[in-house]
Amino acid sequence: MKKKLISSLQFILKLLSKATINKFKPVIIAVTGSVGKTSSKEAIWSILKGQQNSRKTSANFNNELGIPLAILGDYQKISKPAWFFWIKVVLSSVFNILFKSKYFYPKILVLEYGADKPGDINKLVDIAKPHIAVISAIGKIPVHVENYPQGIESVAKEKSKLISNLSTSDIAVLNADDPTISKIEEKTRAKILTFGFSKNSFVRISNFKHLEEDGKIYGIAFKLENNGASVPIILNGAFSVAHAYAAACASCVALTFDINLVGSANALASYYKPIKGRSMIIDGIKESQIIDESYNSSPIALETALISMKEIKNKRKLAVLGDMMELGNYTLEAHEFIGKIIPECLDVLITVGSRAEFIAQSAIKNGMNKNFVFSFNNAQDAGLKLQEIIKKGDLVLVKGSRVVGLDKIVDEVKSAA
């Protein structure tokens, strides 16, 4: 009964969403990817909101219920009682379609498209076909691959449906540094714009570094280059090259609206802020610093975070790493690969969960001192160990899949000040 009600609600919201788009005709920007899509969405909106009348999807509203909420109204959450909320959404949407003028509605929608399983992208494109499609990153072993019976190739195929639906007048914005994405470029008829460190990128990232003052990291700095122009970017409160990719991706999109790199740089500096759980720097207990990546984890995202940790000098570097979920047959391979790069990136490793224990075992096998490797079954015990061993000046990365609950550790070790 519940499934039937949800299915009926999805159908109604789809019809209302299509009618809304048909009436107000906004430019639709759709962002997907196995990692980095939320940060990319936020960066795009950060630039466009100062220049254009735009709206974005809130929170993790990236499915058949969530995306209509962005199209039909700027809803931040599903309030309770749910039945009353959905009635209000439907009635308000009908009223807007019938009586509101075109000036009432945003000119641009920045939407995040999730693809947890085969067929998801087509369902979302059927609700809102984009004019600009962004693929942030996929990686060698994508998240949710467990839900794809044919493995990694079918994940890439699913993501490619976002750009294969584009027309010749549309634009595809793609990560130039991701080999998996490079293989699917031929799937689109749209104009392709690329971003990344690659020399051939339409918007190129260069001179990336973390910023430090008084022994503390406070952000990242890098340059974005396009057509001979080069502009410095500083993002306070951000850690990791992941945010540089988001900024470059957003600048690609901005150029299609005739917003130059200087305009993008100013908007990003003013409006772009890392979201909790996604490479955010926060002060920790005992004058430490915490890199909060507790929202989720995947092989490519974790590798990126660890490489960023490696680049930090003159600090003791610790990490609390939880299970990476939904990797199916690639679970062992992915966790062991992470373990191989741990010794050159960290001084102390704490793992949480049975899968993450493979990281610990691989790290020891590849040269890490076993006296600095600790494995636990739950976040509570891992958090207690971290509180015991953390010292002044430490840099601590906290990253794991949501179900592991590492956000609780972040809350426990962040500074009360």
Image (spheres, rainbow, N blue to C red):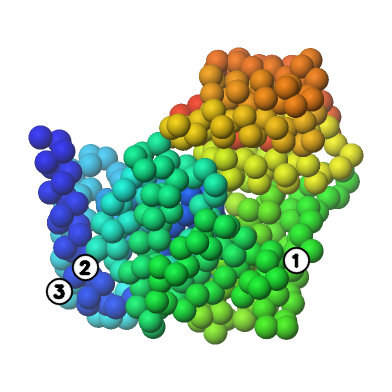
Which quadrant of the view contains residue 234?
bottom right
Q: Amino acid at mark 3?
A: Leu
Which of the marked residues, 2 or 1, is nearer the chain's N terminus? Answer: 2
Q: Earlier in the sequence, mark 3 or mark 2?
A: 2
Q: Which mark is residue 206?
A: 1
Alpha carbon distance from label 1 to label 3: 50 Å
- The residue that appears at 60% across and 68% down in the rendered structure is 195
Q: Name the secondary structure under disc 2.
A: helix
Q: Nearer the viewer, mark 3 or mark 2?
A: 2
Q: Quadrant of residue 381?
A: top right
Total marks shown come to: 3
Labelled disc at residue 59: none
Quadrant where the C terminus sits is: top right
Residues under labels 2 and 1: Cα distance?
41 Å
x, y percent for residue 325: 47, 32
| Mark 1 Cα shell of 10 Å, populated few (<14), some (14-19), many (≥20) | some
Element type where label 3 sits in the image: helix
> Residue 369: where, in percent of width, then height?
80, 20
Instruction: Name the residue rendered at 50%, 81% in the picture.
Output: 257
Identify the residue shown where x is 78% and y is 53%.
210
Left or right: residue 378 compared with residue 417: left
Nearer the observer, 358 or 235: 358
Is 66 left, or right, of 228 in this rendering?
Answer: left
The answer, for residue 72, to whether it is visible in the render is no
Return the residue at label 2: 18
Q: Which mark is residue 98?
A: 3
Residue type indicated by callout 1: Ser
